[in-house]
Amino acid sequence: MSTLTFPEGFLWGTATASYQIEGGADERGPSIWDDFCRWPGKVFEGQTGDVADDHYHRYREDVALMQSLHMKAYRFSISWPRVLPEGRGAVSEVGLGFYDRLVDALLEAGIIPFVTLYHWDLPSALQREGGWAARDTAQLFADYAAIVAKRLGDRVKHWITHNEPWVAAFLGHMMGIHAPGWRDLGLALQVGHHLLLSHGMAIPILREASGADAYVGITLNLSPIYPETDSLEDREAAHIADGFSNRWFLDPVFRGQYPQDMWQRFGPFVPRVVPGDMETISRAIDFLGVNYYTRSVVRAEPGAPLGFVGVRPEGEYTAMDWEVFPDGLRALLVRLHKDYAPKALYITENGCAYEDTLSEDGRVYDPQRIAYLRAHFASAHRAIQEGVPLKGYFVWSLMDNFEWSFGYSRRFGIVYVDYATLRRIPKESALFYAEVARTNAVEI
């Protein structure tokens, strides 16, 4: 075996999201995911995030767990309805105080907090006023960002405005498989625009509150797109798929415009853009967060809505039916560096779900996850060698949790959660990852 050593100061951490782990639903305002979970047939077995991992009450235990695993950073999200139960107006001191205590606990443990302001749990009260389809929601997000940043900005220096706006827009408003559950392309495109607009509006607010050492970015879910064959038709299909999955959000953030080929392809469904919007959206960011899980392979299909369909290549797959393709991470990072030149990049999510079980000896053996992580760490190292300014890596996820429409049927954690008792049990992958974090190196 050989050792791959990462640059000095490289941050190793884990990532979570408020609705997926916190619980404490009766101690905050309702969100669109509370509503969606109660829509019959939308979530596996009607499961909800009401209790989840009960992180809201067990955060000290979870911070101690991260410290024992040598984590250098922790990416978590703020629950908007926990801070502002109605989405605006009166602030919940109890809710905001929770994040105050969590940040203090992390810093006491020597763990750097990376705060995501929005990970899909919009307050229900705002959804009743139109949700992200209403332009006013962008301003309300900026107001919410100001409240959080004013309280935490003296200690939190790393801010992520949004997690995966593509998912919030398209899975939530075009495909109907995430909250709020609508199916309308034009609505989804308008929602995506308002999400990006709110991102740009929040940037100066976060910088002012956190001072000169503020570090502000956005997290996008991105995948390299491969044509099924080398035919001209399939290569063109891959370009369109890249426009839909990647460029539609990358280009506004880094170039101040939507990709023109996709704008023309979307035709009458394009969003309403007000003068000045693109300048706001493209305000300089300090880093790009990248969520990578797998690649996409497509072929041309003239009868499909956008002219392409996905194909399933032969290979190894996770419990999510996602292909294990480590080199896609290297290819994606190199492409982002070449085409968009972000000042810095972080892998803000990468991980895998497998059918984990508790063994008779009380341990959780997950060699497939160890192999998955090892290969992806090596791919990230190769990207660094190719000049990519990658600064850190957050494994998804710290612990098993509520996996959106899959409920509790998928386990992504490096820590096993016994949902009957909420006991946390580090998997073998957690011990592997702890050694990577401790030594800043991986054996391959």
Image (cartoon, rainbow, N blue to C red):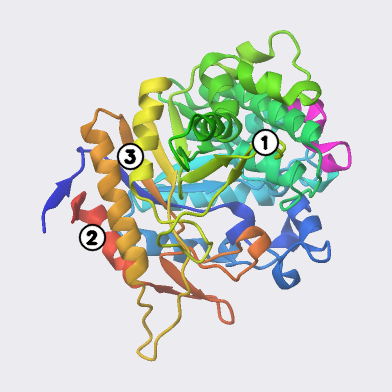
Residue ID at (36%, 53%): 109
- Front position among marks 3 and 1: 1
From this view, report whether residue 151 is shown above or below residue 52.
above
Give the residue at mark 3: 330
- Specify the segment rendered in magenta: 126-140
Give the residue at mark 1: 302
Give the residue at mark 2: 435
Principal secondary structure, stretch drawn in magenta:
helix
Residue ID at (32%, 50%): 376
Categorize mark 1 by other alpha carbons within 10 Å: few (<14), some (14-19), many (20+).
few
Of callouts 3 and 2, which one flags the residue occurring earlier in the amino acid sequence?
3
Residue 285: image x %, image y %?
A: 48, 22
Of callouts 3 and 1, which one flags the residue occurring earlier in the amino acid sequence?
1
Residue 260: image x %, image y %?
A: 62, 16
Label 1 secondary element: loop
Question: Is 103 left, or right, of 432 in this rendering?
Answer: right
